[in-house]
Image (cartoon, rainbow, N blue to C red):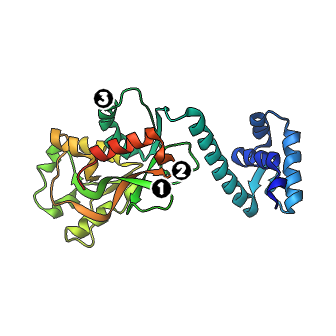
């Protein structure tokens, strides 16, 4: 299709309907009538000679073609919005937006943010959390986090900490554990974000198969650590998340050594956004406070 003939109004209408899954809500966003939106959808379907939606009674579903088109439009509209925001905010903008995994935000970044504000007054940091943080095009954010090797196409990555696990529990429970097998006499606490963590730790500590008294699962690591502090059982912790708890004695390591994987956590930013002065400042600060590699 020739670029001069792209049906931009119809594409915008389709993206809004696909995002809301509602003609009515899309129309309200666009400031037109539902009938006008419906007409735009019929127009683009006729032009492309494909169905973009499966229409059921009071319900819309995207077809495969519709899903493919929506993902492309959503990604590109978001990038356009971000570029316009970057242009209008100018090089002096000091608002930094992050979307991180809940435990990384609560246990690693937030306790360190006072240092950033102390060194860089006047900046405005917004921290959102979510279980899915990989697709930066979906959310209007400057930074997110990833677990991996640090090499992703189109992204600048700043190293945070190595992926390493240790068992932790309340001090009173720790006094009852004298050998590795004693761990299995108590409930093992899991974060559902890393259900492989206990297996990794036991394997590196010489145990291939383990059968604990019970296993309790939590939506994220922060909940598991709180349960461990309350004496519910023994949690498997990301080592970088529990340093202050160990230092103050709220938690103890009852037995064994840390288990390491070959991966690390990184703060990532799209390569074009990484050149913005505010993002360079934040990346440099992160590098200065990240643990020694």
Query: How many numbered markers are drawn?
Result: 3
Disc 3 vs disc 2: which is toward the camera? Answer: 3
Mark number for residue 155?
1
- Decide if residue 52 is on the left or right side of residue 250: right
Whole-angstrom CA distance, mark 3 to mark 1, is: 28 Å
Q: Residue 223 at what x, y percent from top left?
A: 35, 44
Which residue is depicted at the point 44% across and 54% down? Answer: 156
- Indicate the quadrant containing the C terminus: top left, top right, bottom left or bottom right: bottom left
> Mark 3 touching mark 1, by CB under 8 A?
no
Alpha carbon separation for disc pair 1 and 2: 10 Å
- Are there few (<14), some (14-19), or many (20+) residues within 10 Å of tag 1? some
Residue hosting label 2:
136
Q: Which residue is mark 3?
A: 118
Q: Choose the circle earlier in sequence order: 3 or 1.
A: 3
Q: Is residue 214 above or below residue 114?
A: below
Mark 1 or 2, nearer chain start: 2
The answer to whether residue 234 is visible is no
Residue found at x 51% / y 58%: 154
Foreground of the two, 149 or 195: 149
């Amino acid at each position: 299709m020739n670029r001069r003939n792209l049906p931009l109004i119809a594409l915008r209408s389709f993206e809004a309907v696909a995002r809301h899954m509602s003609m009515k809500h899309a129309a309200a966003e666009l400031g037109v009538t539902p009938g006008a939106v419906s007409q735009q959808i019929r127009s683009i379907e006729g032009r492309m000679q494909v169905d973009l939606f499966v229409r059921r009674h009071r319900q819309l579903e995207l077809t495969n073609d519709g899903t493919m088109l929506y993902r492309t439009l959503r990604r590109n509209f978001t990038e356009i919005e971000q570029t316009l925001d970057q242009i209008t905010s100018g090089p002096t903008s000091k608002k930094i937006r992050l979307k991180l995994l809940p435990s990384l935000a609560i246990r690693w970044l937030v306790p360190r943010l006072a240092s950033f504000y102390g060194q860089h007054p006047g900046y405005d940091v917004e921290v959102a959390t979510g279980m899915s943080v990989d697709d930066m095009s979906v959310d209007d954010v400057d930074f997110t986090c990833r677990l991996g090797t640090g090499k992703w196409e189109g992204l600048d990555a700043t190293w945070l900490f190595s992926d390493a696990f240790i068992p932790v529990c309340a001090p009173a429970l720790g006094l009852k554990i004298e050998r590795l097998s004693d761990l299995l006499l108590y409930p093992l606490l899991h974060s559902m974000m890393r259900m492989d963590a206990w297996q990794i730790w036991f394997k590196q500590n010489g145990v291939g198969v383990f059968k604990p008294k019970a296993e309790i699962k939590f939506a994220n690591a922060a909940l598991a650590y709180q349960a461990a502090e309350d004496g519910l059982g023994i949690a498997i912790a990301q080592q970088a998340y529990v340093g202050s708890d160990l230092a103050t004695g709220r938690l103890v390591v009852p037995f064994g050594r840390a288990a390491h994987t070959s991966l690390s956590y990184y703060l990532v930013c799209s390569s074009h956004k990484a050149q913005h002065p505010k993002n360079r400042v934040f990346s440099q600060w992160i590098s200065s406070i990240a643990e020694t590699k």
